[in-house]
Amino acid sequence: PVLSTVSLTVNGTARELELDLRTTLLDALREHLDLTGTKKGCDHGQCGACTVMVNGRRINSCLTLAVLHQGDEVTTIEGLGTPDDLHPMQDAFVRHDGYQCGYCTPGQIVSAVAVLDEVKAGIPSHVTADLATAPEASNVELRERMSGNICRCGAYSNIAEAMAEVAG
Ligand code: FES
């Protein structure tokens, strides 16, 4: 294999990796940095289990090569909160039962955090609603924005409730 050095920041820590050029960002995180919170569901961009943030925007980490992320800042579920100090979105997922088996949950939560950032930044979705004044419409908007994250257990309603609570 052709190896390349990749320097990137993961959850606030500078990391340097010697990687096969064909290594996806997902495999770099899981297999080279031992950050196994990010899950591999389909490995081809269909399920959202591998969602991470790169420079503040969510992506499917299975669809991109690690070498394309020289100098980037990557945030995984491990970078959002800890068991003793949950991120507000993690806390809301727990209280609203936003999961059943839990496999999709890290991707769901990273996506949910990024979605609320997208809303704040005014990035439009196909369905746009006023989150403060139209809770029913906002639920539809949040579901639309989360449509790339599949949950086979069907926890969608509870996920939307958790997100609506954090959105305020
Ligand atoms: Fe990346 Fe399914 S594992 S979208």
Image (cartoon, rainbow, N blue to C red):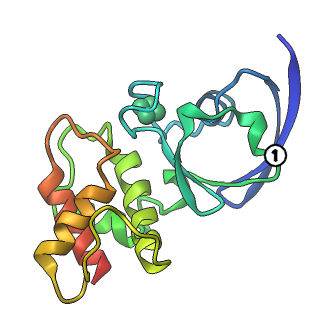
Residue at image position (31%, 54%) is: 146
**Image quarter (top left, top right, bottom left or bottom right) of the N terminus:** top right
Q: Mark 1 points at which residue?
A: 70
Ligand 1 visible in quadrant: top left
Q: Is residue 95 at least partly visible in the picture? A: no
Residue 84 rendering spot, x and y as whole percentages: 42, 65
Q: What element carries label 1?
A: loop
* 153 horizontally vs 28: left or right: left
Task: Give the quarter of the image for residue 138.
Answer: bottom left
Above or below, comparing residue 8 to residue 62 in the picture: below
The furthest residue to the front:
126
Residue 127 rendering spot, x and y as whole percentages: 27, 66
Q: How many residues crowd around disc 1 within 10 Å: few (fewer than 14), some, or many (20 or more)? A: few
Residue at image position (48%, 63%) is: 81
Above or below, comparing residue 166 to residue 78 in the picture: below
Task: Give the quarter of the image for residue 98.
Answer: bottom left
Task: Give the quarter of the image for residue 13.
Answer: bottom right
Q: Which amino acid does label 1 sit on?
A: Gln
Q: Is residue 160 at least partly visible in the picture? A: yes
Residue 105 rendering spot, x and y as whole percentages: 32, 46
Residue 110 rendering spot, x and y as whole percentages: 44, 55
